[in-house]
Structures are given as C-alpha cells and as structure tokens.
Image: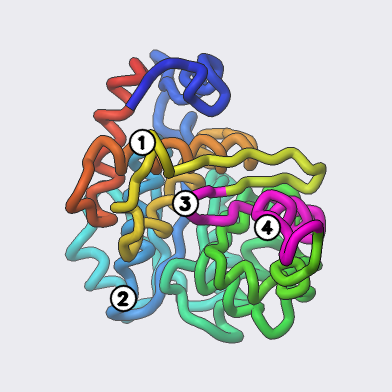
Amino acid sequence: MSKDPRHITGGPAMIDALRKKPQQHKYDHGHALILSGGAGRGGAARLAARGALRIGAGLVTLGCPPAALQENAAQLTAIMLKRVEDARALKEVLEDTRLNALCLGPALGLGKDTRALVETALAAGRATVLDADALSSFAEAPEALFEMLHPETVLTPHAGEFARLFPDIAEAPAEGPALSRVGATRAAAARAGCIVLLKGAHTVIADPGGRCAVNSALYDRSAPWLATAGAGDVLAGFITGLLARGFAPMQAAETAAWLHVECALRFGPGLVAEDLPDMLPQVFRALEV
C-alpha cells in the first residue's frame, strides 16, 4: 500500500477530507441508517453498518423488523438498533432529519416490501446507497426505479445486477461486441440520473454527466481475496458512511472503492468480509489521517 497522493483518489485533498477535526462531535459526522432483512438475514446489513461506522460516520443505526431485533442486539454494540417493520415505519423513522445517509439492499429480501422501502427512502431525499436486493427487486420494472432516483443516490450493482437493470446497455453493440465497462457505466448513470458503481476487478464509477473513475484491483493492486461473500456489503457501508460524513456521492463512491481495495491489500490472503472494516484503522494510520 502506498500513501503517495498520486495513487489516492483525490490526492491530498481527499486525505484531508477523511481527517476528523478537533472539537467536532459525533453529529458533525452524520448518522447513517442501514436497513436489515428479517430473522436470520441480518449478517449482510451488519457488515454494511460496521463498515459505515469504521469509516467515520458519527452514528450508525441498523433498522430491522421486530423478529430480528434480538438477533441483531446480540451481535452489535456501538451500532444502534431501530424497529423498522415496513415502509410506513421507515417513513416515521425518517422524520428524524439527523439521519442523513441511508443504505438499503444487503439481504433485505426481494419483492414488493423492499420496493416499498426503496420508494419511501428515495422520497425522503437523503443521500442513499442502493445495493443487492434493493436493485434486484426492480429487475422486472427498472424504469419504475429510475423514475424515483435522485442525484444523491448511488447504485452499486455487480455485473449480474447491472444486466438486470440495464439489459440493453449490457448487451448493446459498440465498436466491438459489447460496450466497454466504462461506456456501459456512463450510459447507465446517464439513464439513472445518479451515480452508478459497477463492481468488479476493475470497479467503474460514473456520474450522469459522463465523469468516470476506474478503481483497479489488478496488477500491482491485485486483491483476489475480495472475491468473498459480504465484501460488497462492506463496500456499500463504506460509501454510506462517507455520505453521512458529508462527502458528495461521486467522491464517496470513489474514495470507498479505493479504501476497500487498500483494506484487502493490508490484510492479504485469508480475508473474509468481517476483516475489511477492521483494516481501516491501519490504512488511515498509514495515510496519516
């Protein structure tokens, strides 16, 4: 790992943005809300929540159905819990305007209940990360999702989820047999009207205006250990935590993707998703954050 600013998204300014300043308190760093699935399906959301807290969100709350409260309470300490049974309950929770960043999707469940939660979250106008089930629940009607999205949203699909949301873009002819990942992600961001982060060994991040960044985990930054269950959930949490801290959506996605790989490089072989948030202190220390 290198702390050479040329190798860091945003250079010295980004390192400075990651620093917490003296005399600030926890609410100066935002309050993230991560939604969890039901009983037996909370692990992915807990990974995201831990990622959000480790990356510097001042507070993180996990919202879950009543049946999952005891399970989550047994495994969480600094992360708070809130009963969120359905979309109506989420609307009530979001009356607290201090909740400034949301994450929906990791093991949230597929179907109309998740679609209703996404609709409620997006209607609140907060910075929002949509991942996993929050994306796949709209596979049959992606246009319904696109109509609700706003510029403070970040979509984080892997290749399969991307193809379900943007089937024509994923298969459209270009100079070669298919659009490049860069071209495809740019086209997707333009259609969605928000940030799209296409996960992979070459993670591509694009905004609706065509700005694009590529975060590679190949060659001298090869991190094959990231091909493990839950790594994407942690990345969603990293982005959410940075959004809570006030990072712009594109900046949050770029920075989180870079830090995600750095954590994997710091740990090395044998990595599991739970290890990624715990590597952040070492990465920050090396950056002198």
Q: Looking at the rendered structure, which numbered label has been put on residue 68?
A: 2
**Between disc 3 and disc 1, whose residue precedes?**
3
* Crowdedness near tag 4: few (<14), some (14–19) or many (≥20) residues, C-alpha within 10 Å: some
Marks 2/1: CA–CA distance: 33 Å
Residue 75 coordinates in the image, percent (x, y):
20, 61
**Between disc 4 and disc 3, whose residue precedes?**
4
Marks 3/1: CA–CA distance: 13 Å
Quarter of the image where the C terminus is located: top left
Q: Nearer the viewer, mark 4 or mark 3?
A: 3
Q: Looking at the rendered structure, which numbered label has been put on residue 201?
A: 3
Residue 156 horizontal side relative to residue 68, left or right: right
The disc labelled 3 sits on which kind of residue? Ala
Q: Identify the magenta region.
A: 175-203
Which residue occupies the foreground of this view, 3 or 130?
A: 3
Marks 2/3: CA–CA distance: 34 Å
Q: Looking at the rendered structure, which numbered label has been put on residue 262?
A: 1
**Between disc 2 and disc 3, whose residue precedes?**
2
> Could you tell me if residue 179 is visible in this image?
yes
The relative height of residue 156 versus residue 165 in the rendered view (above or below) is: above
**Between disc 2 and disc 1, whose residue precedes?**
2
> In terms of secondary structure, where does tag 2 sit?
helix
Check if residue 93 falls in the magenta segment. Answer: no
State the residue at coordinates (34%, 62%): 230
Q: Looking at the rendered structure, which numbered label has been put on residue 124?
A: 4
The disc labelled 2 sits on which kind of residue? Ala
The disc labelled 4 sits on which kind of residue? Ala
